[in-house]
């Protein structure tokens, strides 16, 4: 039941963010929109950024599972690209806010967790086997997030083509 309430709150929160932008969403506006009490909100979340973090954690879990079922590195990366493109307007509203620094940190952490999880469950030849794996993961997380935000707004985006380009850059064969 608690997860359902968290999901309800998160859905209403992001609907309000899409309408107003994150800077104009308050706890008061959110609880009125949800039809819940302030106490209920604070029972489930510490603040509005906690809603963002909780939602990103769920999205990462879902994306990891979808990518692992994709069948190939190219298909998995194309799935991530498609998902980012579908949610780009929301991500842009989150980044173009007074909370940009917090949002960027959360998005980077989500990308880092996603890559770490996917790579840890991937075949051994895709896993880093050197002492700088942590730094490499940071580099890939920032780089991939930057590429996704830059290219996912292109109306002519071809997720498979971008995935193939990224894999070629990384020296991976699909």
Image: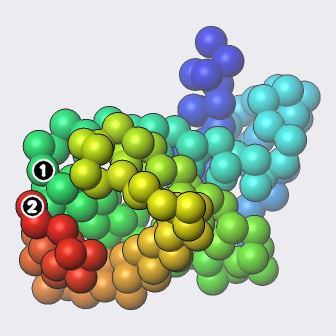
Label pair 2/1, CB-CB below 8 angstroms: yes
Judge whether 43 appears above or below 99 on screen.
Answer: above
Name the residue at 42% across, 55% down: 129
Name the residue at 24% across, 42% down: 123
Q: Nearest the camera: 172 or 22?
A: 172
**Which residue is at the far right?**
39
Q: Residues within 10 Å of mark 1 (few under 14, many from 20)?
A: few
Q: Quadrant of the N terminus?
A: top right
Name the residue at 31% across, 78% down: 152
**Residue 101 lies in quadrant:** bottom right
Q: Quadrant of the C terminus?
A: bottom left
Judge whether 56 appears above or below 2 on screen.
Answer: below
Indicate left or right for 3 with 70 as reference. right
**Which residue is at the far front?**
130
Q: How is the image coloured?
A: rainbow
SS at mark 2 in the image = loop
Residue 41 coordinates in the image, percent (x, y): 81, 34
Q: Is residue 71 visible?
A: yes
Indicate left or right for 57 with 46 as reference. left
Q: Nearest the camera: 135 or 53?
A: 135
Name the residue at 24% across, 61% down: 77
The residue pinned by badge 1 equals 72
Residue 109 coordinates in the image, percent (x, y): 61, 59
**Residue 106 lies in quadrant:** bottom right
Q: Nearest the camera: 57 or 51?
A: 57
Residue 143 coordinates in the image, percent (x, y): 45, 79
Between discs 2 and 1, the one toward the N terminus: 1
The residue pinned by badge 2 equals 174
């Amino acid at each position: 039941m608690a997860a359902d309430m968290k999901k309800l709150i998160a859905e209403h929160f992001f609907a309000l963010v899409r309408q107003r932008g994150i800077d104009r969403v308050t706890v008061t506006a959110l609880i009125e929109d949800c039809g819940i009490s302030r106490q209920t909100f604070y029972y489930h979340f510490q603040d509005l950024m906690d809603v963002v973090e909780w939602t990103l954690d769920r999205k990462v879990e879902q994306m990891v599972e979808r990518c692992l079922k994709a069948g190939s590195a190219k298909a998995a990366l194309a799935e991530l690209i498609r998902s980012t493109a579908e949610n780009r307007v929301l991500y842009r509203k989150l980044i173009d806010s007074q909370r940009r620094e917090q949002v960027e940190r959360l998005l980077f952490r989500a990308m880092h967790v996603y890559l770490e999880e996917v790579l840890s469950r991937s075949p051994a030849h895709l896993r880093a086997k050197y002492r700088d794996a942590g730094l490499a993961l940071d580099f890939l997380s920032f780089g991939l997030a930057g590429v996704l935000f830059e290219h996912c707004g292109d109306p002519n985006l071809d997720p498979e083509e971008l995935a193939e380009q990224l894999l070629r850059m990384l020296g991976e064969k699909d």
